[in-house]
Amino acid sequence: MTATGDAVLPGTFRLNNVLVAPNIIKNLISVRQLTTDKNCFVEFDPFGLSVKDLHSRNEIIRCNSSGPLYSLMPPAASSSSCALIAAAPAAVWHRRLGHPGHEALFKLSSVSAISCTHHSSDQLCHACQLGRHIRLPFANSSSRALKNFDLIHSDLWTSPIKSVSGYKYYLVILDDHSHFLWTFPLRLKSETFSTLANFFSYVTTQFGCTIKNVQCDNGREFDNSSARFFFLTHGVCPVLTPPPKTGRLNAFFAPLTILCAPFSSKLPCLLPTGLKAFTLPLIY
């Protein structure tokens, strides 16, 4: 059995709970299931069968048969072309027809081109989701820098709304070795490079370390002539590609927005030159 649904005989006679078995030679009907679903009874005679209503005893359908088996076939239908047509769920038709949208399936069903048991726009198709991906998912990385500030990951997130103090952008810097996170609220995207350059000075002064590698995406806030010249003169190796660990920063954007947006005007100045930032130790 490959599917379960409803079936409609040519005419108006509907059968419920039909099991679809492609390899079966003949379509079989359970008399017990028929009489239970339709609240009727079946009378057999040498010339055929009659399906009658249980209470009124009115005849619902009469089928004559001349062969060794009783066949349930309405007289209005041609005996040579009558067949049971199973109404499959919309998800089955979605796969059969090459994954069309819900609107296309509904239109086909409304003109009786296909027979669907139900329509649901809440069902997600796994194949459709994979087909719309623009790139393959990144594999989990177990690599880790040997020392603090040997490698930092940086990313910029745009908040859907501005904070009370007018901050709309958040620069996130993650140290690959210690997993320590710095978050800088920014009013303008153009402040990204100056904030990153000031962070380099802060690390050199406060920790006595030199940042050796910066991993970030291909956004123009990181990939521009000023940033490239700065990296070149400071001997920093930039990697402008979204690696797995840079992608992990996205998981912190939502909770950090909750922290940054309402209270950004009350943050202490943790860095020199007036920079406001959160410093959060991360363990994962």
Image (spheres, helix red, strand yellow):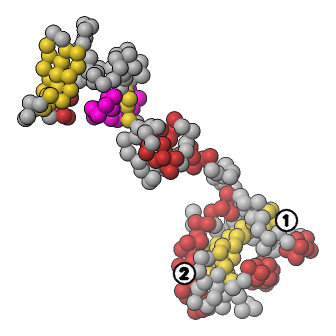
**Magenta stretch encompasses residue 85:** no
Q: Residues within 10 Å of mark 2 (few under 14, many from 20)?
A: few
Q: Residues within 10 Å of mark 1 (few under 14, many from 20)?
A: some
Q: Is residue 197 left or right of residue 170?
A: right
Whichever of callouts 2 and 1 sits on the residue coming sooner in the sequence is 1
Residue holding disc 2: 259
**Magenta stretch encompasses residue 14:** yes
Quadrant housing the N terminus: top left
Report which quarter residue 245 is drawn in. Answer: bottom right
Q: Is residue 240 left or right of residue 94?
A: right
Report which quarter residue 8 is drawn in. Answer: top left
Q: Residue at x 53, y 79 (%)?
A: 258
SS type, badge 2: helix
The one of 118 and 176 positioned closer to us in this rendering? 118
Q: Is residue 153 left or right of residue 126?
A: right
Report x, y in % for residue 72: 26, 21
SS type, badge 1: strand
The one of 261 and 276 positioned closer to us in this rendering? 261
* Magenta segment: 1-19
Q: Which mark is residue 104?
A: none
Three-letter amino acid code of the residue under disc 1: Cys
Q: Residue at x 66, y 91 (%)?
A: 269
Q: Residue at x 57, y 83 (%)?
A: 261
Report which quarter residue 207 is drawn in. Answer: bottom right
- The image shows residue 160, relative to residue 78, as above or below, that is below
Q: Given contact means CB atoms under 8 Å apart, are the residues at marks 2 and 1 in contact? A: no
- The image shows residue 200, relative to residue 58, as above or below, that is below
Q: Is residue 143 visible?
A: yes
The one of 136 and 129 positioned closer to us in this rendering? 129
Taken as a whole, is the magenta stretch helix, strand or loop?
strand
Residue holding disc 1: 237
